[in-house]
Image (cartoon, rainbow, N blue to C red):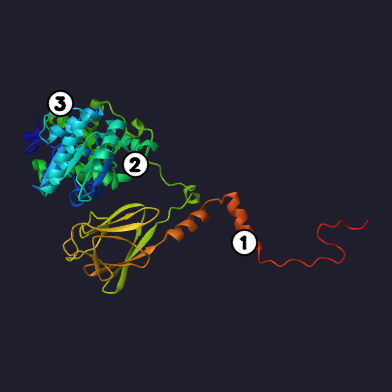
Amino acid sequence: MYCELFHLKEPPFRLTPDPQFLFGSKQHTRAKAYMESTIWLADGFVVITGDIGSGKTTLIESFLTELPDDVVLAHISQTQLSPVEFLQALLVEFGFKPFAMRKIELLAVLKDFLVKQYAEGKRVILIVDESQNLSRKVLEEIRLLSGIEARKEKVLRIILAGQPELAEKLDSPGLRQLTQRVRLRFHLSAFSKRETREYIEHRLRVAGAGQRNVFSDEALDSVFRYTGGVPRLINILCDTAMLCAFADEKDFVELESLEAAVEELQWTAYSERHREPARELDSTDEHKKVVLPFGRLDILHEGQLVGSFDLAEGRAIIGRTSNNDLQLRSTFVSRHHAQILTDPQRSTLEDLNSTNGIFVGSQRVRRHELSNGDAIRLGEHKLVYRDLREERVVGETRTGEQPKSERESSRQEVDKPRRRRPRRKGRGRGRKPRQ
Protein backbone atom coordinates (compact mmCIF):
# COMPACT_ATOMS: atom_id res chain seq x y z
CA MET A 1 0.00 0.00 0.00
CA TYR A 2 2.65 2.53 1.07
CA CYS A 3 5.64 0.98 -0.76
CA GLU A 4 5.44 3.33 -3.74
CA LEU A 5 5.32 6.45 -1.54
CA PHE A 6 8.35 5.30 0.48
CA HIS A 7 10.16 3.98 -2.64
CA LEU A 8 10.35 0.40 -1.32
CA LYS A 9 10.28 -2.90 -3.19
CA GLU A 10 8.16 -4.67 -0.56
CA PRO A 11 6.64 -4.07 2.89
CA PRO A 12 9.50 -4.15 5.43
CA PHE A 13 7.52 -5.07 8.55
CA ARG A 14 5.37 -8.04 7.63
CA LEU A 15 4.65 -10.44 10.47
CA THR A 16 5.12 -13.60 8.41
CA PRO A 17 8.60 -15.15 8.99
CA ASP A 18 10.93 -14.32 6.11
CA PRO A 19 14.56 -15.52 6.29
CA GLN A 20 15.89 -12.67 4.15
CA PHE A 21 14.78 -10.19 6.82
CA LEU A 22 16.56 -11.99 9.66
CA PHE A 23 18.52 -9.43 11.66
CA GLY A 24 21.92 -10.72 12.74
CA SER A 25 22.00 -9.47 16.29
CA LYS A 26 24.69 -11.01 18.45
CA GLN A 27 22.23 -13.26 20.26
CA HIS A 28 20.37 -14.35 17.11
CA THR A 29 23.66 -15.09 15.36
CA ARG A 30 24.82 -17.17 18.32
CA ALA A 31 21.51 -19.04 18.55
CA LYS A 32 21.77 -19.86 14.85
CA ALA A 33 25.34 -21.08 15.31
CA TYR A 34 24.18 -23.38 18.09
CA MET A 35 21.43 -24.71 15.83
CA GLU A 36 24.05 -25.34 13.14
CA SER A 37 26.05 -27.35 15.68
CA THR A 38 23.39 -30.08 15.47
CA ILE A 39 24.63 -30.73 11.93
CA TRP A 40 28.25 -31.16 13.00
CA LEU A 41 27.60 -33.23 16.14
CA ALA A 42 26.10 -36.71 15.97
CA ASP A 43 24.42 -36.23 19.35
CA GLY A 44 23.34 -32.64 18.77
CA PHE A 45 20.38 -31.67 20.96
CA VAL A 46 19.63 -27.95 21.27
CA VAL A 47 16.84 -26.06 23.03
CA ILE A 48 16.06 -22.47 21.95
CA THR A 49 13.59 -20.44 24.00
CA GLY A 50 12.29 -16.92 23.68
CA ASP A 51 9.25 -14.81 24.46
CA ILE A 52 6.39 -14.46 22.00
CA GLY A 53 7.57 -12.50 18.99
CA SER A 54 11.29 -12.80 19.76
CA GLY A 55 12.12 -14.18 16.29
CA LYS A 56 12.39 -17.94 16.93
CA THR A 57 10.40 -18.98 13.86
CA THR A 58 12.26 -16.56 11.56
CA LEU A 59 15.51 -17.96 12.94
CA ILE A 60 14.38 -21.51 12.14
CA GLU A 61 13.31 -20.54 8.62
CA SER A 62 16.72 -18.96 8.02
CA PHE A 63 18.43 -22.10 9.33
CA LEU A 64 16.35 -24.29 7.01
CA THR A 65 17.35 -22.34 3.89
CA GLU A 66 21.02 -23.20 4.50
CA LEU A 67 20.81 -26.93 5.22
CA PRO A 68 23.28 -29.12 3.27
CA ASP A 69 21.96 -31.61 0.72
CA ASP A 70 22.79 -34.61 2.89
CA VAL A 71 20.43 -33.51 5.70
CA VAL A 72 17.02 -35.19 6.02
CA LEU A 73 14.61 -32.87 7.83
CA ALA A 74 11.46 -33.28 9.89
CA HIS A 75 9.87 -29.97 10.94
CA ILE A 76 6.89 -30.18 13.29
CA SER A 77 5.03 -27.06 14.41
CA GLN A 78 1.69 -28.57 15.49
CA THR A 79 2.56 -29.76 18.97
CA GLN A 80 -0.70 -30.41 20.83
CA LEU A 81 -0.40 -34.13 20.12
CA SER A 82 -0.52 -37.43 21.94
CA PRO A 83 2.61 -39.63 21.84
CA VAL A 84 1.15 -41.79 19.04
CA GLU A 85 0.08 -38.71 17.03
CA PHE A 86 3.54 -37.21 17.45
CA LEU A 87 5.23 -40.36 16.11
CA GLN A 88 2.76 -40.41 13.21
CA ALA A 89 3.47 -36.74 12.44
CA LEU A 90 7.21 -37.48 12.49
CA LEU A 91 6.86 -40.36 10.02
CA VAL A 92 4.63 -38.24 7.77
CA GLU A 93 7.50 -35.72 7.57
CA PHE A 94 9.71 -38.58 6.35
CA GLY A 95 7.22 -39.57 3.63
CA PHE A 96 5.36 -42.43 5.32
CA LYS A 97 1.59 -42.99 5.72
CA PRO A 98 1.52 -44.38 9.26
CA PHE A 99 -2.09 -43.71 10.33
CA ALA A 100 -3.10 -47.37 10.68
CA MET A 101 0.01 -48.38 12.62
CA ARG A 102 0.13 -49.17 16.31
CA LYS A 103 2.75 -47.52 18.49
CA ILE A 104 5.14 -50.47 18.42
CA GLU A 105 4.98 -50.48 14.62
CA LEU A 106 5.58 -46.72 14.49
CA LEU A 107 8.71 -47.06 16.61
CA ALA A 108 10.02 -50.00 14.56
CA VAL A 109 9.52 -48.20 11.23
CA LEU A 110 11.08 -45.02 12.60
CA LYS A 111 14.15 -46.80 13.96
CA ASP A 112 14.70 -48.69 10.70
CA PHE A 113 14.41 -45.42 8.75
CA LEU A 114 16.93 -43.60 10.97
CA VAL A 115 19.46 -46.43 10.83
CA LYS A 116 19.09 -46.66 7.04
CA GLN A 117 19.72 -42.91 6.64
CA TYR A 118 22.84 -43.21 8.81
CA ALA A 119 24.11 -46.12 6.67
CA GLU A 120 23.66 -43.97 3.55
CA GLY A 121 25.72 -41.16 5.08
CA LYS A 122 22.77 -38.83 5.67
CA ARG A 123 22.09 -36.75 8.76
CA VAL A 124 18.56 -36.57 10.17
CA ILE A 125 17.37 -33.47 12.03
CA LEU A 126 14.11 -33.07 13.92
CA ILE A 127 12.96 -29.49 14.57
CA VAL A 128 9.96 -28.97 16.83
CA ASP A 129 8.59 -25.43 16.99
CA GLU A 130 6.15 -24.33 19.73
CA SER A 131 7.63 -27.07 21.91
CA GLN A 132 6.19 -25.55 25.09
CA ASN A 133 2.89 -27.25 24.14
CA LEU A 134 4.40 -30.74 24.13
CA SER A 135 3.10 -32.98 26.89
CA ARG A 136 5.47 -34.71 29.29
CA LYS A 137 4.72 -38.02 27.61
CA VAL A 138 5.67 -36.67 24.19
CA LEU A 139 8.86 -35.16 25.61
CA GLU A 140 9.68 -38.58 27.03
CA GLU A 141 9.23 -40.09 23.55
CA ILE A 142 11.66 -37.49 22.19
CA ARG A 143 14.17 -38.48 24.87
CA LEU A 144 13.91 -42.13 23.83
CA LEU A 145 14.27 -41.21 20.15
CA SER A 146 17.42 -39.22 20.95
CA GLY A 147 19.01 -42.41 22.26
CA ILE A 148 18.68 -44.45 19.06
CA GLU A 149 22.19 -45.43 17.92
CA ALA A 150 23.98 -47.07 15.01
CA ARG A 151 27.60 -48.12 15.51
CA LYS A 152 27.64 -46.26 18.85
CA GLU A 153 26.61 -42.97 17.21
CA LYS A 154 23.30 -41.15 17.64
CA VAL A 155 21.22 -41.13 14.47
CA LEU A 156 18.82 -38.27 15.25
CA ARG A 157 19.70 -34.63 15.88
CA ILE A 158 17.07 -32.56 17.68
CA ILE A 159 16.18 -28.86 17.99
CA LEU A 160 13.35 -27.82 20.31
CA ALA A 161 12.15 -24.22 20.07
CA GLY A 162 9.51 -22.66 22.27
CA GLN A 163 8.41 -20.03 24.72
CA PRO A 164 9.95 -19.72 28.23
CA GLU A 165 7.43 -22.25 29.55
CA LEU A 166 9.48 -24.90 27.74
CA ALA A 167 12.50 -24.13 29.93
CA GLU A 168 10.33 -24.34 33.05
CA LYS A 169 8.98 -27.69 31.91
CA LEU A 170 12.45 -29.08 31.20
CA ASP A 171 13.63 -28.00 34.65
CA SER A 172 10.94 -30.06 36.38
CA PRO A 173 12.19 -33.20 38.24
CA GLY A 174 10.20 -35.58 36.02
CA LEU A 175 12.17 -34.56 32.90
CA ARG A 176 15.64 -34.69 34.40
CA GLN A 177 16.73 -37.51 32.06
CA LEU A 178 15.71 -35.51 29.00
CA THR A 179 17.49 -32.39 30.26
CA GLN A 180 20.71 -34.37 30.64
CA ARG A 181 20.58 -35.21 26.92
CA VAL A 182 20.44 -31.54 25.93
CA ARG A 183 23.81 -30.24 24.75
CA LEU A 184 22.88 -26.57 24.72
CA ARG A 185 20.08 -24.29 25.89
CA PHE A 186 19.85 -20.70 24.67
CA HIS A 187 17.31 -17.97 25.43
CA LEU A 188 16.51 -15.18 22.97
CA SER A 189 15.85 -11.95 24.84
CA ALA A 190 14.46 -8.66 23.51
CA PHE A 191 16.65 -6.15 21.67
CA SER A 192 18.39 -3.27 23.39
CA LYS A 193 17.58 0.29 22.38
CA ARG A 194 20.52 0.36 19.96
CA GLU A 195 19.62 -3.04 18.49
CA THR A 196 16.00 -1.89 18.02
CA ARG A 197 17.20 0.99 15.85
CA GLU A 198 19.56 -1.30 13.91
CA TYR A 199 16.77 -3.87 13.43
CA ILE A 200 14.43 -1.26 11.92
CA GLU A 201 17.15 0.11 9.63
CA HIS A 202 18.09 -3.43 8.56
CA ARG A 203 14.56 -4.34 7.50
CA LEU A 204 14.16 -1.07 5.61
CA ARG A 205 17.44 -1.69 3.74
CA VAL A 206 16.31 -5.21 2.75
CA ALA A 207 12.99 -3.76 1.55
CA GLY A 208 14.82 -1.34 -0.75
CA ALA A 209 15.42 1.83 1.28
CA GLY A 210 19.19 1.54 0.97
CA GLN A 211 20.91 4.11 3.19
CA ARG A 212 17.92 6.47 3.06
CA ASN A 213 16.36 7.40 6.41
CA VAL A 214 12.66 6.62 6.69
CA PHE A 215 12.18 7.20 10.45
CA SER A 216 13.33 10.24 12.39
CA ASP A 217 15.68 9.75 15.36
CA GLU A 218 12.90 10.76 17.76
CA ALA A 219 10.53 8.22 16.22
CA LEU A 220 13.14 5.44 16.45
CA ASP A 221 13.76 6.18 20.12
CA SER A 222 10.04 6.13 20.76
CA VAL A 223 9.67 2.70 19.11
CA PHE A 224 11.78 1.14 21.83
CA ARG A 225 9.71 2.81 24.53
CA TYR A 226 6.50 1.22 23.27
CA THR A 227 7.82 -2.17 22.15
CA GLY A 228 10.50 -3.03 24.71
CA GLY A 229 12.67 -4.32 21.86
CA VAL A 230 10.37 -7.27 21.02
CA PRO A 231 10.71 -7.89 17.24
CA ARG A 232 7.05 -8.67 16.55
CA LEU A 233 5.88 -5.57 18.41
CA ILE A 234 8.45 -3.49 16.53
CA ASN A 235 7.01 -4.76 13.25
CA ILE A 236 3.43 -3.97 14.29
CA LEU A 237 4.22 -0.44 15.46
CA CYS A 238 6.49 0.50 12.55
CA ASP A 239 4.03 -0.83 9.97
CA THR A 240 1.19 1.13 11.59
CA ALA A 241 3.34 4.28 11.81
CA MET A 242 4.14 4.05 8.09
CA LEU A 243 0.42 3.68 7.33
CA CYS A 244 -0.29 6.80 9.42
CA ALA A 245 2.40 8.72 7.52
CA PHE A 246 0.97 7.40 4.23
CA ALA A 247 -2.51 8.66 5.19
CA ASP A 248 -0.98 12.12 5.68
CA GLU A 249 0.89 11.77 2.35
CA LYS A 250 4.29 11.90 4.08
CA ASP A 251 7.24 9.80 2.89
CA PHE A 252 9.06 10.20 6.22
CA VAL A 253 7.92 8.87 9.61
CA GLU A 254 8.24 11.53 12.27
CA LEU A 255 7.35 11.37 15.95
CA GLU A 256 3.86 12.67 15.19
CA SER A 257 3.10 9.69 12.94
CA LEU A 258 4.50 7.25 15.48
CA GLU A 259 2.38 8.69 18.28
CA ALA A 260 -0.66 8.49 16.01
CA ALA A 261 0.14 4.78 15.51
CA VAL A 262 0.45 4.26 19.27
CA GLU A 263 -2.95 5.88 19.75
CA GLU A 264 -4.40 3.73 16.97
CA LEU A 265 -3.07 0.58 18.65
CA GLN A 266 -4.17 1.85 22.08
CA TRP A 267 -0.75 1.04 23.54
CA THR A 268 0.91 2.45 26.61
CA ALA A 269 4.65 2.33 27.30
CA TYR A 270 5.97 -1.23 27.27
CA SER A 271 7.12 -1.01 30.89
CA GLU A 272 3.57 -0.12 31.94
CA ARG A 273 2.05 -3.01 30.00
CA HIS A 274 4.59 -5.43 31.47
CA ARG A 275 5.05 -4.86 35.16
CA GLU A 276 8.18 -7.02 35.47
CA PRO A 277 10.99 -5.01 33.82
CA ALA A 278 14.53 -6.28 33.96
CA ARG A 279 15.89 -5.75 37.46
CA GLU A 280 18.94 -3.56 37.75
CA LEU A 281 21.78 -4.47 40.05
CA ASP A 282 21.29 -3.03 43.53
CA SER A 283 23.55 -2.63 46.50
CA THR A 284 22.32 -5.84 48.13
CA ASP A 285 23.47 -8.02 45.24
CA GLU A 286 27.12 -7.71 46.17
CA HIS A 287 26.39 -9.59 49.40
CA LYS A 288 24.85 -12.54 47.60
CA LYS A 289 26.63 -15.74 46.63
CA VAL A 290 29.43 -15.20 44.13
CA VAL A 291 29.37 -17.64 41.19
CA LEU A 292 32.88 -18.76 40.28
CA PRO A 293 33.91 -20.56 37.08
CA PHE A 294 34.70 -24.27 37.03
CA GLY A 295 37.75 -23.79 34.81
CA ARG A 296 39.85 -21.26 32.94
CA LEU A 297 41.77 -21.18 29.68
CA ASP A 298 44.98 -19.16 29.54
CA ILE A 299 45.36 -18.08 25.89
CA LEU A 300 48.86 -17.92 24.45
CA HIS A 301 49.98 -16.81 21.00
CA GLU A 302 53.59 -17.34 19.96
CA GLY A 303 54.40 -18.07 23.59
CA GLN A 304 52.93 -14.81 24.90
CA LEU A 305 49.90 -14.72 27.21
CA VAL A 306 47.24 -12.70 25.37
CA GLY A 307 44.17 -13.32 27.52
CA SER A 308 42.09 -15.78 29.50
CA PHE A 309 38.60 -17.27 29.24
CA ASP A 310 36.47 -18.56 32.11
CA LEU A 311 34.51 -21.80 31.75
CA ALA A 312 31.14 -21.73 33.46
CA GLU A 313 28.67 -24.61 33.38
CA GLY A 314 27.44 -25.32 29.85
CA ARG A 315 28.98 -25.15 26.39
CA ALA A 316 31.68 -22.80 25.12
CA ILE A 317 32.31 -22.79 21.35
CA ILE A 318 35.73 -21.76 20.06
CA GLY A 319 36.26 -20.51 16.53
CA ARG A 320 37.43 -17.84 14.12
CA THR A 321 34.23 -15.76 13.80
CA SER A 322 32.73 -13.29 16.27
CA ASN A 323 29.63 -15.39 17.02
CA ASN A 324 31.71 -17.88 19.01
CA ASP A 325 32.02 -17.74 22.78
CA LEU A 326 35.81 -17.59 22.41
CA GLN A 327 37.08 -16.01 19.18
CA LEU A 328 40.58 -16.84 17.94
CA ARG A 329 41.44 -14.65 14.96
CA SER A 330 43.56 -16.97 12.84
CA THR A 331 43.36 -18.51 9.38
CA PHE A 332 44.38 -21.81 10.98
CA VAL A 333 41.21 -21.85 13.10
CA SER A 334 37.90 -22.97 11.55
CA ARG A 335 34.74 -20.88 11.71
CA HIS A 336 33.47 -23.14 14.51
CA HIS A 337 36.53 -25.15 15.50
CA ALA A 338 35.94 -26.81 18.87
CA GLN A 339 33.77 -26.76 21.95
CA ILE A 340 34.24 -27.37 25.67
CA LEU A 341 31.39 -28.86 27.68
CA THR A 342 31.64 -28.02 31.38
CA ASP A 343 29.67 -29.39 34.32
CA PRO A 344 30.39 -29.50 38.06
CA GLN A 345 32.48 -32.67 37.64
CA ARG A 346 34.49 -32.21 34.45
CA SER A 347 35.30 -30.22 31.32
CA THR A 348 35.35 -32.08 27.99
CA LEU A 349 36.97 -30.83 24.79
CA GLU A 350 35.40 -31.81 21.42
CA ASP A 351 36.44 -31.18 17.82
CA LEU A 352 33.68 -29.70 15.61
CA ASN A 353 34.97 -31.27 12.38
CA SER A 354 37.62 -28.57 12.08
CA THR A 355 40.02 -28.49 9.14
CA ASN A 356 43.26 -28.54 11.15
CA GLY A 357 42.07 -30.45 14.20
CA ILE A 358 42.86 -29.98 17.88
CA PHE A 359 45.87 -31.30 19.78
CA VAL A 360 46.36 -31.95 23.48
CA GLY A 361 50.08 -32.08 23.95
CA SER A 362 51.35 -33.75 20.76
CA GLN A 363 48.32 -35.97 20.24
CA ARG A 364 45.44 -35.09 17.94
CA VAL A 365 42.09 -35.72 19.65
CA ARG A 366 38.43 -35.59 18.74
CA ARG A 367 37.16 -35.79 22.30
CA HIS A 368 39.20 -35.39 25.47
CA GLU A 369 38.35 -34.97 29.15
CA LEU A 370 40.55 -32.14 30.30
CA SER A 371 42.93 -32.34 33.24
CA ASN A 372 44.53 -29.45 35.09
CA GLY A 373 47.49 -28.16 33.08
CA ASP A 374 46.49 -29.66 29.71
CA ALA A 375 47.88 -27.65 26.80
CA ILE A 376 45.43 -27.44 23.87
CA ARG A 377 46.81 -26.39 20.50
CA LEU A 378 44.54 -24.84 17.85
CA GLY A 379 46.66 -23.63 14.95
CA GLU A 380 49.02 -20.93 16.26
CA HIS A 381 47.23 -20.65 19.59
CA LYS A 382 47.82 -22.59 22.77
CA LEU A 383 45.13 -22.81 25.45
CA VAL A 384 46.30 -23.97 28.87
CA TYR A 385 43.48 -25.44 30.93
CA ARG A 386 43.22 -24.70 34.64
CA ASP A 387 40.74 -26.60 36.80
CA LEU A 388 39.22 -24.18 39.33
CA ARG A 389 36.78 -26.54 41.03
CA GLU A 390 38.67 -26.55 44.33
CA GLU A 391 38.85 -22.75 44.28
CA ARG A 392 35.14 -22.64 43.44
CA VAL A 393 34.25 -24.78 46.46
CA VAL A 394 36.39 -22.62 48.72
CA GLY A 395 34.92 -19.42 47.23
CA GLU A 396 31.33 -20.61 47.65
CA THR A 397 32.04 -21.61 51.25
CA ARG A 398 33.43 -18.16 52.01
CA THR A 399 30.50 -16.34 50.45
CA GLY A 400 27.84 -18.32 52.29
CA GLU A 401 27.33 -19.30 55.94
CA GLN A 402 28.88 -22.60 56.92
CA PRO A 403 26.53 -25.29 58.18
CA LYS A 404 26.82 -25.83 61.92
CA SER A 405 28.50 -29.22 61.64
CA GLU A 406 31.15 -27.79 59.30
CA ARG A 407 31.79 -24.84 61.62
CA GLU A 408 32.24 -27.17 64.56
CA SER A 409 34.51 -29.46 62.55
CA SER A 410 36.72 -26.63 61.35
CA ARG A 411 36.83 -25.16 64.83
CA GLN A 412 37.93 -28.52 66.21
CA GLU A 413 40.73 -28.71 63.70
CA VAL A 414 41.90 -25.26 64.64
CA ASP A 415 41.76 -26.09 68.35
CA LYS A 416 43.77 -29.32 68.10
CA PRO A 417 47.26 -27.77 68.18
CA ARG A 418 46.51 -25.63 71.23
CA ARG A 419 48.48 -26.68 74.33
CA ARG A 420 46.58 -27.51 77.48
CA ARG A 421 47.17 -25.42 80.55
CA PRO A 422 48.86 -27.42 83.36
CA ARG A 423 46.51 -28.61 86.07
CA ARG A 424 46.82 -27.00 89.46
CA LYS A 425 48.23 -29.21 92.15
CA GLY A 426 45.60 -31.10 94.07
CA ARG A 427 42.88 -30.70 91.48
CA GLY A 428 42.46 -33.56 89.07
CA ARG A 429 39.98 -33.60 86.21
CA GLY A 430 36.52 -34.15 87.52
CA ARG A 431 37.55 -33.93 91.22
CA LYS A 432 35.58 -31.56 93.40
CA PRO A 433 37.56 -28.93 95.28
CA ARG A 434 37.98 -29.41 99.02
CA GLN A 435 35.46 -27.70 101.18
The residue furthest right is 435
The part of the image, by quadrant, that contains residue 300 is bottom left
Local crowd size for mark 2, using a 10 Å CA cut-off: few (<14), some (14–19), many (≥20): few
> Can residue 339 be seen in this snapshot?
yes
SS for dot 3: loop
**Inter-mark Cα distance, 3 to 2:** 29 Å
Q: Residues within 10 Å of mark 3 (few under 14, many from 20)?
A: some
Dot 2 falls on a residue whose secondary structure is helix
User: Foreground residue, 6 or 374?
Assistant: 374
Q: Position of residue 223 (x, y in %)?
A: 25, 37
Check residue 179 in the rendering and tell me which mark sits there, or answer none: none
Disc 1 is placed on an element classified as helix
Which residue is nearer to you in this view: 134 or 51? Answer: 134
* Residue under label 1: 413
Judged left or right of residue 258, residue 275 is right
User: Which kind of residue does numbered mark 2 sit on?
Assistant: Gln
- The quadrant in which residue 321 appears is bottom left
| Mark positioned earlier in the residue sequence (3 or 2) | 3
Q: Looking at the picture, how far across and down is residue 391, in whole percent? A: 46, 60
Which quadrant of the structure image shows residue 338? bottom left
Instruction: Identify the residue under disc 3.
Output: 99
Type of the residue with mark 1: Glu
One can see residue 257 in this view: no
Of the numbered discs 1 and 3, the one sitting upstream in the chain is 3
Q: Quadrant of the N terminus?
A: top left
Q: Looking at the rendering, in which quadrant would you find the C terminus?
A: bottom right
Cα separation between marks 2 and 1: 41 Å
Residue 284 lies, in percent from the top left, at: 49, 47
How crowded pointer 1 is (Cα within 10 Å; few <14, some 14-19, many 20+) is rated as: few
Residue 177, numbered label: 2
